[in-house]
Image: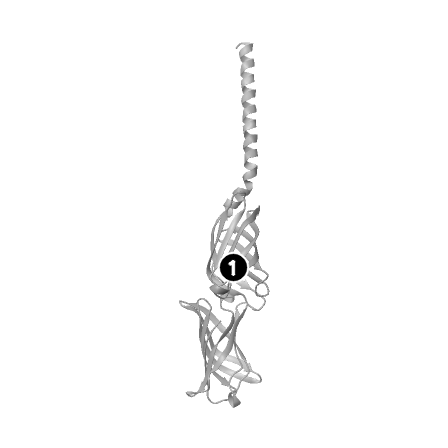
Amino acid sequence: MKLIEIISLAVVAVFATSCEKNENQNQNQNQEPGLEVNLSEAVAGTYTGYSTAEFQYSSTPMVSQSQTLTVTAEDGGTVSVSYTSDTWGTFTMAGAAVTESGGTYALNGSGKTVMGMSADSQSEYDCTLTAEISGTDDFSFVFDVPAVMGGLKITLLPGNPPAELLISGSYTGTLTMSVMGTAMDPMEEAQVSLAAEGDVWTLTLPEMGMGTMSMESISVEVELAESADGYTLSAESIEAVSGETSITGSLTGTVSADGSTMTLSAEITPGAMPMAINVDFEGTK
């Protein structure tokens, strides 16, 4: 091969390498501004689950099932978030920032919520959003509304709510007492509470009755089981106290699948009383 041919091939090789290097640099430069857009597209989609609402005037969170939230990618790498709650109203915000660390995406933004007791009494309030997303089945969206109910925090989580969140709380309704078929006047606005501590469920009946049949509140450990229609409560052998009086008996009950209603039927015997007192309750949360 002649010297001139060798030199020509070397020049072509150097030129080709230089062009490839410049092309790669240009591609990298073009990708840099798009990183945020890719993050926003990565979290865009529909998220379904349940929500909990915490506020100053309730000791237990209010739970809503079958909730849906939508995240939409925007130009510039931000996202818009839309969530409509059948209980709390509509939450909308645009321009929420997206960051990523270790495969978990974080959202931060602010916007408005429209809520009210009725369509005629709705008002607009400021709210903020923070969220962590690892997938459509692993996420947490938190809306804070400082001006509502002493500070309202609504959290959207995946799946179905655990029983301790869904059915724990206080149920208000009508309680009746009867002995051998003779009933006392019903107690309206009676409150029965159900609480969980670990795997132990405790049902508390209110102070009830009058005269020789009056009793202080009674707390009963009950067994909880899921059923086709919700949950069942049972206590086959009650050993409790009402004030200084021992209470024996049994209890059965149901709680609806959405945790909104409770029915109870119990036979309780205070101390050495020769016959049982029948107690029935129907209430809503």
Mark 1 packing: few (<14 Cα in 10 Å), some, or many (20+)?
Answer: some
Front residue (pair 7, 19): 19
Amino acid type for the residue under numbered disc 1: Val
Residue 282 drawn above or below residue 115: below
Residue 200 drawn above or below residue 267: above
Q: Position of residue 187 (x, y in %)?
A: 48, 82
Q: Position of residue 232 (x, y in %)?
A: 44, 71
Residue 106 in sight in this render: yes
Direction left: furthest residue = 228
Direction top: furthest residue = 2
Count of marks overlaid on the render: 1
Q: Quadrant of residue 150?
A: bottom right
Q: Position of residue 2 (x, y in %)?
A: 54, 9
Q: Quadrant of residue 57?
A: bottom right
User: Under tag 1, what secondary structure?
Assistant: strand
Residue 162 in sight in this render: no
Front residue (pair 197, 23): 23
Residue 238 drawn above or below residue 179: above
Q: How is the image coloured?
A: one colour
Residue visible at 49% across and 48% down?
72
Front residue (pair 198, 63): 63
Q: Position of residue 27 (x, y in %)?
A: 54, 32
Q: Which residue is mark 1?
A: 114
